[in-house]
Image: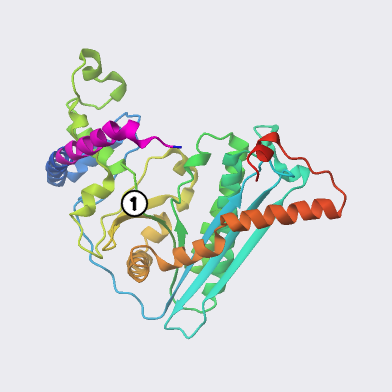
């Protein structure tokens, strides 16, 4: 039971600190505006300084002045939008049997094409001994951890949307494939070589398939927390040249470095007031290490004012370099967000078909126990589960 009286002072302090943070936020935005103006004065110099900087942060670069704004592109009257999502039931040692379940879904929405929408789900249960292990992880055999299962789910989602892309292509109308979240597989960055390369090869197969069919893939990130462009502006604020954070003189004399003036800002905050509804930013790159292995599928990023928020949109390089594909992604992401009252309707529908709710989980484990009883298998329950009566 929560004794809320004991934390009333902390709640009051939280409100006061948030108010103070908001005041500082306005000052940071003002500094950021000045930095953008200085970048505009010499874009080539800014790009060179960013590229040569040695930092521990991820930075973003750009080809055009970063305050360049692109108006909303026209949306083809007849078009299709595909999306995929997934959810899982993780292995639970407190349950009757050790297993995990992945449920992925796909949705295809057709507009002005006289074709009915299509939704499919693909539940897969993993329970065999060899399925509960990753058999080639740096030359070792290891248990499937939550992280490895999460990667497996991502790969399943990509295979699912690959099937949807193939189906949507049959309509021969413009189409976009939406993915919930980033197209950059950050989680693979520090994984062993053999495992990372195998997983990334499978992941990028869908990109290549989409490229062959001329259907761009876009990662839609709602309420993004990324700071790549902010980090680039921090480099511009630095009073050292070349920039090398490991040898920062301010760390040695315990003074505040100039870059800290905008350290708490996020990229989305920069573009929130610079883009009108429907407008997008310039394209940005990322210096994430994993992208060195993406080849022609390297990722470009833009920010989009959906009218409800500033979303981060990621697309492969081959789509970014194709003006008609780039404009199509721009138009579809905005239109889908409007139709979904703030979030793409295709992604929301894919989520609804993929999500495993608490009652689904309960039904799953009840059927699992019934199967064990039916076939005379031994059922063991942990003391923890019995004590909590579930």
- The residue at which mark 1 appears reads as 223
Q: Main secondary structure of the magenta part?
A: helix
Q: Residue furthest bottom?
A: 114
**Picture layout, residue 169 above or below residue 99:** below
Q: Residue at x 33, y 34 (%)?
A: 5
Counting from the top left corner in percent of width and height, residue 264 is at 25, 37
Q: Residue at x 45, y 67 (%)?
A: 346
Counting from the top left corner in percent of width and height, residue 179 is at 47, 58
Q: Nearer the viewer, residue 153 or 203?
A: 153
Quarter location, residue 42: top left
Residue 49 visible in the current orientation: no
Counting from the top left corner in percent of width and height, residue 137 is at 65, 35
Which type of secondary structure does the marked residue at label 1 adopt?
loop
Residue 114 visible in the current orientation: yes
> Magenta residues?
2-23
Quarter location, residue 124: bottom right
């Amino acid at each position: 039971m929560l004794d809320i009286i004991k934390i009333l002072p902390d709640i009051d302090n939280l409100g006061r600190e948030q108010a103070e943070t908001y005041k500082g936020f306005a000052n940071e935005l003002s500094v950021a505006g000045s930095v953008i103006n200085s970048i505009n004065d010499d874009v080539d110099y800014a790009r060179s300084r960013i590229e040569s900087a040695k930092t521990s942060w991820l930075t973003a670069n750009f080809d055009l002045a970063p305050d360049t704004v692109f108006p909303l592109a026209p949306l083809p009257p007849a078009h299709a939008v595909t999306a995929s999502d997934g959810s899982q039931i993780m292995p639970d040692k407190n349950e009757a049997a050790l297993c995990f379940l992945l449920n992925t879904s796909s949705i295809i929405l057709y507009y002005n094409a006289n074709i009915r929408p299509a939704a499919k789900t693909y539940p897969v249960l993993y329970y065999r001994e060899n399925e509960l292990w990753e058999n080639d992880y740096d030359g070792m055999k290891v248990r499937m951890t939550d992280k490895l299962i999460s990667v497996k789910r991502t790969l399943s989602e990509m295979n699912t949307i690959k099937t949807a892309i193939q189906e949507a292509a049959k309509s021969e109308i413009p189409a976009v494939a939406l993915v919930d979240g980033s197209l950059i597989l950050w989680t693979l960055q520090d994984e062993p070589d053999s495992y990372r390369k195998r997983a990334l090869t499978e992941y990028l197969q869908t990109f290549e398939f989409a490229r062959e069919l001329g259907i761009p893939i876009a990662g839609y990130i709602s309420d993004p927390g990324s700071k790549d462009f902010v980090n680039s502006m921090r480099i511009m604020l630095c009073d050292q040249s070349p920039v090398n954070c490991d040898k920062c003189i301010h760390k040695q004399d315990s003074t505040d470095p100039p870059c800290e003036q905008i350290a708490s800002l996020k990229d989305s905050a920069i573009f929130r007031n610079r883009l009108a509804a429907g407008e997008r930013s310039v394209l940005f790159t990322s210096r994430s290490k994993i992208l060195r292995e993406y080849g022609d599928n390297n990722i470009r990023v833009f920010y989009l004012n959906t009218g409800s928020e500033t979303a981060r949109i990621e697309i492969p390089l081959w789509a970014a370099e194709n003006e008609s594909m780039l404009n199509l992604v721009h138009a579809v992401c905005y239109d889908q967000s409007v139709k979904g009252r703030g979030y793409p309707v295709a992604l929301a529908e894919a989520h609804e078909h993929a999500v495993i709710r608490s009652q689904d989980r309960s039904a799953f484990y009840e059927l699992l126990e019934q199967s064990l009883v039916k076939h005379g298998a031994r059922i063991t329950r942990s003391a923890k589960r019995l004590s909590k009566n579930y």
